[in-house]
């Protein structure tokens, strides 16, 4: 039986909202959870093309799409605020480690090659 | 014997140092919930050991180091500013939205619709006094609706002015508290964690109202700048803000509503520099959103423009008609129509507030006859009815009907409110995020931090790419769901 579009979109929204929560809690673990949630959201949207009942989609589906869009925008904002924060930190660390360039920018931190093992 | 005494001295010194370290730990535990408090660490210093010089070595209590990170503190303050701004916008716009209701049984939209119905009924019986009276009553209701909306907007402007004054007072009061704390910090040479906590709690509170940057000075005091440009506090010197209403120099409309202005201590106008926080949101609402409807020295405002164009169009159609046509033999001249609406013609920003039905018009003075040629006995009511679905650009405002133009105003308010609500939700999340980052990074060693940041950056890249794909898939979905016109 084909899934109702509004319900399908609502399920995707829950995943994106989960990603938002992970982004607000920001930690390496939370970012992994965020990545997983976004992957599931992406897959659900792709699968929805085939499995959702598009013929009977109406106003409720449009409203749910709009809510999902707001959640995606919120995730984008959280991602960019976190990114901005750490970019600023890298500049400070760069300046502390290597000073400033002739243009007045902080010296970029040299690439750190690390191996991360999890298990 | 001397080595035994030295040993006792060393032990006593160590006990003293550890006692201080325990006191610092106790203070950390006791202040776990104190706003603005940052945990402290007691450093220990090895004392020189050179028996020949009389230095017996041991350990002493060193400096107490705060885990506070000013970069993380500023990030939290920035998010407080954003949240303060969005929250204030939501409050202000919620009040505004209630004036632009297009779904209820009152307001301009409903009154406009009723007036069109009365024109239609009059067109069917042009000489019927009940139908004529119906037009006057509906026109009066529309004028009242315009007046009420204008009055509601003026009231919102007055409330915003009061809130602006209160917010400026609040900012000055908080900076005053910080000034006193700076003086206290100077007295303790910046080493008092309690004063430092109070300063940071006050700074976080202040950042809800205005965008600030705060820098800790070597003497333990804080320098606070508004938007990084205007000094609010340097050491023990406070620079107070002032609020006032003014007419811009480029005003072309006499007696237009004034605009709000915030000035720095030296009298400089800093209104445009305050782009965030509660104060920024209030200024934007007061100086941009409200004037777009109610007007200011340089614009009439969309509500006044709508009221004036509608009144002029209706009056123009009525005065082009005849109350009674000229007699066929030409002996009795036609009695021309009279205007239905009046308004203040001396002030373009006062049209909606002064719109009224002419006090001298009677039902029998409504001109129904279009003199043509050919003469049409109900031509005028028919032309007035057609305003609902205009056939020519002369009967439109900005390319659309009067009803649609009012609907656009309501939509604009709704969109602004949606954006503010969405921004408020996102800012709440971003504030939580900044607070978490502050918590995580306090006392973390820089090398550790660099490694974590690089780990974060890779994850940001992956998440950002995925979000872009989701956004594109969603746009495709919305396109499928949007009915083609």
Image (cartoon, rainbow, N blue to C red):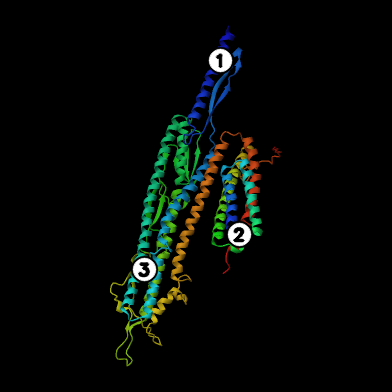
How far apart marks 3 and 1 lie (CA) works out to 91 Å
The answer to whether dots 3 and 2 both sit on one chain is yes
Quadrant for the C terminus of chain A in the image:
top right
**Residue B310 % position (x, y):** 40, 71
B411 is higher (above) or lower (below) than B210 = below
Q: Which mark is residue A91?
A: none
Q: Are marks 3 and 2 in contact (CB under 8 Å)?
A: no
Please state which of residues B30 and B178 is positioned toward the viewer in this rendering.
Answer: B30
Q: Which residue is mark 3?
A: B142
Please state which of residues B229 and A93 is positioned toward the viewer in this rendering.
Answer: A93
- The residue under the point 34% across, 83% down is B322
**Residue B234 % position (x, y):** 45, 39
Label 1 SS? helix
Quadrant position of residue B364: bottom left
**Residue B350 % position (x, y):** 36, 65
The first of marks 1 and 2 along the sequence is 1
């Amino acid at each position: 039986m084909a899934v109702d579009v509004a319900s399908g979109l609502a399920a995707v929204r829950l995943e994106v909202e989960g990603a938002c929560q992970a982004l607000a809690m920001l930690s390496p673990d939370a970012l992994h959870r965020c990545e997983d949630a976004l992957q599931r959201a992406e897959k659900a949207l792709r699968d929805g093309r085939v499995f959702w009942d598009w013929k009977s989609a109406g106003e409720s589906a449009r409203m749910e799409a709009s809510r999902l869009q707001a959640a995606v925008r919120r995730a984008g904002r959280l991602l960019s605020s976190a990114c901005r924060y750490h970019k600023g930190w890298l500049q400070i660390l760069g300046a502390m480690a290597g000073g400033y360039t002739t243009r007045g920018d902080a010296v970029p931190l040299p690439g750190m090659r690390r191996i991360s093992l999890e298990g | 014997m001397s080595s035994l005494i030295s040993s006792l001295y060393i032990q006593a010194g160590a006990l003293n140092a550890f006692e201080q370290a325990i006191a610092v730990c106790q203070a950390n535990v006791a202040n776990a919930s104190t706003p603005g408090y940052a945990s402290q660490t007691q450093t220990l210093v090895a004392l020189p050991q050179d028996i020949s010089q009389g230095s017996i070595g041991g350990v002493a209590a060193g400096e107490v180091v705060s885990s506070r990170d000013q970069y993380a503190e500023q990030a939290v303050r920035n998010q407080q500013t954003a949240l303060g701004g969005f929250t204030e916008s939501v409050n202000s716009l919620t009040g505004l939205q209630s004036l632009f209701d297009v779904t209820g049984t009152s307001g301009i939209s409903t009154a406009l619709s009723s007036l069109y119905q009365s024109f239609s009924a009059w067109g069917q019986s042009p000489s019927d006094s009940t139908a004529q009276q119906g037009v006057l009553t509906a026109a009066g209701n529309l004028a009242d609706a315009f007046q009420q909306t204008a009055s509601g907007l003026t009231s919102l402007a007055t409330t915003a002015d009061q809130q602006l004054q209160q917010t400026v007072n609040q900012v000055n009061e908080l900076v005053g508290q910080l000034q006193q704390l700076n003086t206290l910090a100077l007295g303790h040479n910046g080493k008092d964690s309690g004063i430092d906590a109070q300063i940071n709690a006050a700074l976080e509170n202040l950042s809800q109202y205005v965008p600030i940057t705060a820098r800790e000075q070597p003497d333990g005091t804080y320098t606070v700048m508004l938007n990084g440009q205007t000094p609010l506090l340097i050491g023990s010197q406070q620079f107070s803000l002032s609020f006032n209403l003014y007419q811009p120099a480029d005003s072309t409309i006499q007696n237009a509503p004034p605009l709000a202005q915030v000035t720095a201590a030296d009298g400089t106008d800093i209104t445009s520099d305050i782009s965030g926080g509660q104060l920024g949101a209030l200024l934007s609402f007061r100086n941009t959103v409200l004037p777009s409807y109610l007007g200011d020295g340089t614009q009439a405002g969309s509500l006044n423009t709508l009221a004036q164009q509608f009144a002029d169009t209706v009056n123009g159609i009525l005065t082009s008609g005849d109350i009674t046509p000229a007699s066929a033999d030409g002996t009795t001249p036609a009695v021309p129509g009279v205007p239905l609406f009046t308004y203040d013609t001396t002030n373009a920003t006062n049209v909606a507030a002064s719109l009224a039905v002419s006090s001298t018009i009677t039902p029998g003075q409504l001109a129904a006859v279009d003199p043509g040629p050919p003469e049409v006995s109900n031509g005028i009511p028919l032309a007035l009815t057609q305003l609902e679905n205009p056939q020519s650009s002369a009967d439109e405002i900005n390319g659309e009907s009067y009803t649609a133009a009012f609907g656009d105003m309501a939509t604009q308010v709704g969109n602004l409110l949606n954006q503010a609500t969405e921004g408020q939700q996102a800012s709440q999340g971003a504030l939580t995020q900044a607070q978490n980052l502050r918590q995580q990074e306090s006392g973390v060693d820089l090398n550790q931090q660099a490694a974590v940041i690089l780990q974060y950056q890779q994850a940001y890249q992956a998440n950002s790419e995925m979000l872009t794909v989701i956004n594109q898939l969603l746009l495709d979905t919305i396109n499928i769901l949007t009915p083609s016109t």
